[in-house]
Image: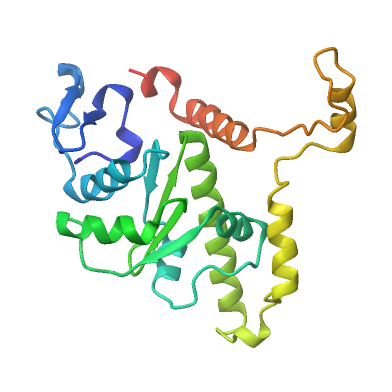
Amino acid sequence: FGIGFDEITASNLLKVNLDGMIIQQSIPADRREINPGKGRVFKPGYVLHSAIHAARHDVHAIWHGHDLDASALSQTTIGILPLSQEASYVLKKGLSFHPFEGSANDESEQPRLVANLGPTNQFLLLEDHGPIVACPTIEEAFHGMYFLTRACKYQMKSFAAVGGDLSRINIPDDESTDEIMRRIDNFDEAPASAKSTASNTANSNNKDEVVMHDTSGLMFAYARRSAERVFGKDQIYR
């Protein structure tokens, strides 16, 4: 806590247990001109993350942020509508809401936060605050947050374009929404030609084998390469 996101390197991250105790820190002396001392844990971050990690053992990567459009949308009662592929992905993975109680620095809020996230949802919109993404892997968390913030940007722009008049928004009906959600199940599926190639391999005995792309992994790998180009590997991983 106390440094900008663009100043973070591998050596000034803190490893914290579920009780909020720092169990690993390795800020070298030559890095302390940015963050003097050994650093400290940001309590609101600890309250949110530790609650979910303790309750959801399927979750290994949590991302909370204050993206402007996502936070603005959290201040409305409309929620995320199925207006885009990105929004449909979020809704399919499970989206729930948590009422605003003030700064997330009170541990008594944790049971309510966990209850509102639920046992399987990957997205929680903190009302009047911002989004939380809770996923099995870092790659999926990046994928999820990217899609959620894109969905919110589209929706906020479309609302602005029609002056907030929902009757002028192309909101899918129930039948269309069902089909949209069905197609999300096949979001990572490869084209038929790839399936055919896979079924002809020596290791495949299933002619109907479905080949799936690792979309989350591909997106995260590109983001990593982009950061390395901008900031340099030597600066990031020191």
Residue 55 versus residue 188: which sits nearer the camera?
Answer: 55
Q: Quadrant of the N terminus?
A: top left
Point out residue 100 in the picture as x, y percentages from the top left corner: 28, 69
Residue at point 18% right, 44% down? 42
Residue 231, by quadrant, is top left
Q: Quadrant of the C terminus?
A: top left
Residue at the extreme top of the image, as rendered: 202
188 relative to 36, above or below:
below
Residue at the extreme left of the image, as rendered: 37
Residue at the extreme front of the image, as rendered: 205
Residue 106 in view of the camera: no
Q: How many marks?
A: 0
Residue 149 in view of the camera: yes
Colour basis:
rainbow
Residue 117, by quadrant, is bottom left
Residue 12 versus residue 235: which sits nearer the camera?
Answer: 12
Left or right of residue 220: residue 63 = left
Left or right of residue 133: residue 167 = right
Left or right of residue 19: residue 149 = right
Point out residue 118 in the picture as x, y percentages from the top left corner: 40, 56
Residue at point 59% right, 65% down? 154
Residue 160, by quadrant, is bottom right
33 relative to 135, above or below:
above
Residue at point 47% right, 53% down? 121
234 relative to 122, above or below:
above
Point out residue 205 in the picture as x, y percentages from the top left corner: 84, 20
Residue at point 63% right, 67% down? 82
